[in-house]
Image (cartoon, rainbow, N blue to C red):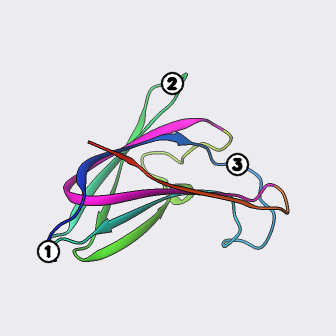
Amino acid sequence: MDSMGRRRWAIAEGYIPSQSTGPAPAMTSHETACLLNTGERDAHVELTLFFKDREPAGPYRVTVPARRTLHLRFNDLQEPEPVPRDTDYASVLVSDEPIVVQHTRLDSRQAENALMTTIAFSE
């Protein structure tokens, strides 16, 4: 299969609630970037977070193997710093290979959970 996607993506909306309802880790409130690499080479991705009242965080670095997918929970990002909870942010992903990026949020602060998903903006 040929490579699909773009090399630069933006997710303008990000927020991880500090509270959750339900069993962890499946029902922990989280943000996820679902990364798809249909190409023949590994994709090396850098993720930078932008905030309204401080300097950006990152880059966070991940690899999406060739012909694979990676569901990257922002909650799990620790280096260079943990992603702050209860804080608005946006993210930019830059890859050395074309990838497809989908954004998903699970908000489980209440027993009635909310799940949102959308394709990120690509350039």
Dominant secondary structure of the magenta stretch? strand
49 left or right, relative to 38: right
| Location of residue 40 by image quarter | bottom left
Determine which of the numbered discs, if any, sits on residue 17 in the image.
3
Q: Is residue 27 magenta?
A: no
> Left of 92 or right of it: where is 31?
right
Answer with mark 1 or mark 3, whichever residue precedes in sequence: 3
Q: Amino acid at mark 2?
A: Arg
Real-space Cα distance between discs 1 and 2?
38 Å
In this image, 90 relative to 114: left or right? Answer: left
Q: Badge 1 is on which residue? A: 40
* Numbered range of the magenta stretch: 87-109
Residue 25, horizontal then vertical, whole percent: 67, 71
Query: Which sits in the foreground, 8 or 5?
Result: 5
How many C-alpha atoms fall within 10 Å of the one at disc 1: few (<14), some, or many (≥20)?
some
- Residue at 36 percent of width and 72 percent of height: 69
Of the numbered discs 1 and 2, the one sitting upstream in the chain is: 1
Q: Tag 2: Cα neighbours inside 10 Å, few (<14), some, or many (≥20)? A: few
